[in-house]
Amino acid sequence: MSAGARPWKAATAWLIFLGPFFFLTYGAANHLAASRENVPAIVFDWERSIPFWDWSILPYWSIDLLYGLSLFLCASRAQLNIHVKRLVSAQIIAVSCFLLFPLAFSFERPVTEGWAGHLFTLLAGFDKPFNQAPSLHIALLVILWVLYAPLTQRRWRWLLHAWFTLIGISVLTTYQHHFFDVPTGMLLGWLCVWAWPADQASPLAGAGLTRDPRRRTLAFRYGVGAAIAALLGILIGGVALWLLWPAVSLLLVAMSYLLFGPAGFQKQADGRLTPAAAWLFAPYLLAAWLNSRWWTRTHEDAHEIVPGVWLGRLPAAQDALWSKIHTVIDMSAELPLRRPRGSKVEVVAFPTLDLTLPSRPTLEQARAALEAARRKGPVLVCCALGYSRSALAVAAWLLRHGDARDVSQALQLICRARPAVVLTTAHLATLEALHAGV
């Protein structure tokens, strides 16, 4: 295949496979659920006021066309492979949920005539009132939305978003799904996009059980938090089912500490998280952001350690500090860095898990980046609070390029400017080893 050629043959082959794969697995789950007695439904009383719009069967069905066409829109074999992995993962996970936890749709659909009636009849030929949560329709919608949006010209993107939103609404207005299926379907879709990112390695590829006891302890704590949130949501029910979102978020945090490392948060080179990570980790991100603001509420956002080198918390887009700096060196993995609109401040990210020590290579790279950036202008080194990870990076730089003769003097320079800095004996031991070249 020549460079730049679209993988037409591969796309055709995948379409030939995915079509039967979808209908066989989906149909088998439907058949098995239909053979069971008393399949439950998760439905809220307010859903009875959702209108039935027979015309919305058209956007509902349109996802099939968008699904097939999407394979031929991939510009390279690599992009096609990633897209197919997302589609297949969503199918396998959703069907597994349908088999393990079958749910039924409980409303009676009104009789429909005309062209819409024909489409409903065609749908009823293979789709029974089962296969509910997570909605595979919604999961696939998220995956397709992520693919189609960048390919659509900006002036027409509003139309794409409007139509895809209508597809999402149609699962309710065609009486195909209850509301519970929609957010769970969204979680599944974003999970598949997160597992198979487009512009960076998959967090699954580098997964390995950590030997760091500190990371294992934190993984256990977040895992317990995830279990508590999930149990409360399931036992209480109703509105408390929204606790399943924080449960998934905390579970992914726990797995990042235990298996994935900083890659689990998918921080990009510009300091932002991928959209998938931002959605999946959203409850945790909100708590982490509020926590960072609470602990630093009585202190300056940043302090100048030596001329041209600032140490502080992750800045918000509206902070005045942006006008004083040329480069931001971001040491946090868990929080997104958002630059002001139109800002030309450079960002260099060295993602490090919260409450853990940066690795030796990370510290080496961070202090080299700090020295290079300092030659261009003022630099801010930051993390969630600006107390540990970023302080360690600045201390490492002071030992190599700054005015510190030893670790004690480096610590003195930092604490004099930013007294709230917390560097433990483990941090100091790391600095001593780095300074000694061990």
Image (cartoon, rainbow, N blue to C red):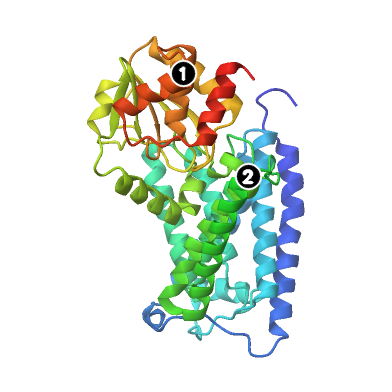
Left or right: residue 144 compared with residue 94: left
Answer with the quarter of the image where residue 11 lies: top right
Query: Can residue 334 be seen in this snapshot?
Result: yes
Query: Can residue 176 be seen in this snapshot?
Result: no
Q: Are marks 1 and 2 in contact (CB under 8 Å)?
A: no
Of the pair 200 and 370, the residue shown nearer to us: 370
Residue 6, image x and y in percent? 67, 32
Which quadrant holds the C terminus? top right
Which quadrant holds the N terminus? top right
Of the pair 356 and 250, the residue shown nearer to us: 356
Residue pictured at 48% horizontal, 62% vertical: 245
The amino acid beneath tag 2 is Phe
Left or right: residue 292 compared with residue 126: left
Up the image or down, 329 lies above or below 109; here it is above
Residue 34, image x and y in percent? 69, 83
The amino acid beneath tag 1 is Trp
Left or right: residue 287 compared with residue 212: left
Q: Give the SS element for disc 1.
A: helix
Up the image or down, 291 lies above or below 5; here it is below
Label 1, label 2: how far apart the Cα atoms are: 28 Å
In primary-sequence order, the first of circles 1 and 2 is: 2
Residue under circle 2? 260
Residue pictured at 72% horizontal, 55% vertical: 18
Residue 431, image x and y in percent? 53, 25
Q: List the single residue furthest toward the front.
A: 408
Residue 368, image x and y in percent? 51, 16
Residue under circle 1? 397
How crowded is the residue under tag 1: few (<14 C-alpha within 10 Å), some, or many (20+)? many
Residue pictured at 64% horizontal, 43% vertical: 212
Left or right: residue 130 compared with residue 116: right
